[in-house]
Amino acid sequence: MSWVWFHRFGSPPWVYGFARRWAPWFGGVAAIAMLVGLYGGLVLAPPDYQQKDAYRIVYVHAPSALLSLMIYTTMAIAAAVGLIWRIKVAHAAAAACAPIGAWFTVATLGTGMLWGKPMWGTYWAWDPRLTSELVLLFLYFGYMGLRAAIEDPQKADKASAVLAIVGVVNVPIIKYSVTWWNSLHQPPTRLIGEADMAGNMVWPLITMFGAFGLYFAAVFLVRLRAELLRRERNASWIREVLT
Amino acid sequence: MKSDEYTVAWLVARRDLRLAFRKPSQLIQPLMFFMIVATLFPLTLTPELSRLRDAAPGVLWVGALLSSLLALEFLFREDAQDGTLEQFALSGQSLTWMLFAKTCTHWLLTGVPLAISAPLAAGALGVPLSAMPALVAALLLGSFAMSLTGSISAGLTLGARRGGVLLSLLTLPLAVPILVFGANATQRAITGDDIAPPMYMLGAIAVLGATLAPLAAAAAVRIGLE
């Protein structure tokens, strides 16, 4: 088997077509999974013995938090691929990731604050995990700010790629902050094996993780298409695709 | 001909030192800024020394970070404008070592004076004399790490139109660990606790910065010069 199929991912027209074909499928499956997960989480799952119904925000909070970190990692990997092998599509992919990741970070902080008020008695605590998630938001802002401030698109791609790679040090800090420091935030919940959660609470959560991941894939492909259109606006394949 | 890295680094450092002493006002500005920031807190917070002492670690470290951000503006900008950096990049010598030398010199000229004069501001904020050696040591390590992380963002913003605010936005998230451990070391020194744990962390960050930051800074500067 040859590796030629892999090289197609470096070709803007092919990736454009791929994104156009697959985005609706990812979006559709994400919508169904989200409905199922929300029904399971908000209706079928029993209330928690301590937190009553307030814990149900976890069905939005935990997937957003996971994605906020995962998207940053994806962005940094795409940026590194673009920087090392000089692949235009990879830079476009990194650029498409940033705003989505920033919004998931905002969603994580927002849902966390809504939950924190009844549970901790405060919207915000200067706790390692909360603070490092906020720092992640600033990293996204810095990445987008640097991209916007450099006029030459290729220079902007490369400079922001270096920043994304340098910023990766923050990802393990957030991931393990609750284990390393005495944090107000609870430690990670085990979902499989010796689970800390009842089964009828777990499956909606896992469904929501999947749904959020697929939703990200769908939005990412749409943004990637827009990014490719903008970058390749003078290329001849655009005219063929659009007519 | 490629000369050995240490000679190149030494030559760059000597050039930067000589240039800096010909324009001493640029050296004094960040220091003045630090002192002004430290003075503003007793005026706005409370003149009571016992309460100021609680705020002192934060005030000193935020002041040090802000003044190091102010000084970062001078790190590469002038050399980029007059084409010196371009000559460095084209010289065939190791750009990483040259930038490392520049960053170290920059630290010698801004971080070290700040650390040495910090006891003056700290004393005014009610920090006891016994905490001063630890404060100076922590600031020496911390400002070195700040200069190194700052060299990456200073290199990245070379190609940007408006450097100022962007430079802070890029540097602050990366400088958070330095700030946390530095302020923690100062806090422990004031209360008389063991300062070793945060100092080890600061040292580790400084070593990590010294090994990796010049590489990233060189990559950033090359991109900016393209």
Image (cartoon, rainbow, N blue to C red):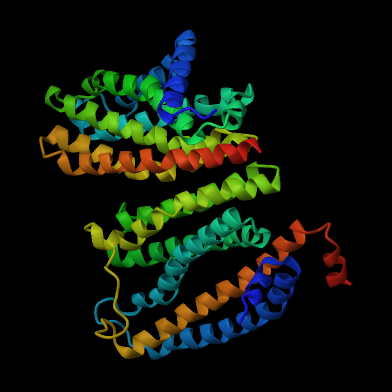
Where is residue B196 shown, x and y percent of the image? 15, 40
- Figure quadrant of residue A180: bottom left
**Above/below status of B58 relative to A102:** above
Judge left or right: residue A194 versus residue B16.
left
Residue drawn at 42 percent across, 39 percent down: B149
Q: Nearer the viewer, residue B105 or B140?
A: B105
Q: Nearer the viewer, residue A129 or A80?
A: A80
- Figure quadrant of residue B102: top left
Quarter of the image with the N terminus of chain B is top right
Where is residue A240 shown, x and y percent of the image? 87, 70
Residue drawn at 40 percent across, 74 percent down: A57
Q: Nearer the viewer, residue B87 or A47?
A: B87
**Above/below status of B199 relative to B113:** below
Judge left or right: residue B118 versus residue A225.
left
Judge left or right: residue A55 versus residue A148.
left
Residue farthest along the top direction in this orientation: B22
Where is residue A15 shown, x and y percent of the image? 70, 71
Residue drawn at 42 percent across, 77 percent down: A59
**Above/below status of A105 relative to B146:** below
Where is residue A84 shown, x and y percent of the image? 57, 55
Quarter of the image with the C terminus of chain B is top right
- Figure quadrant of residue A88: bottom right
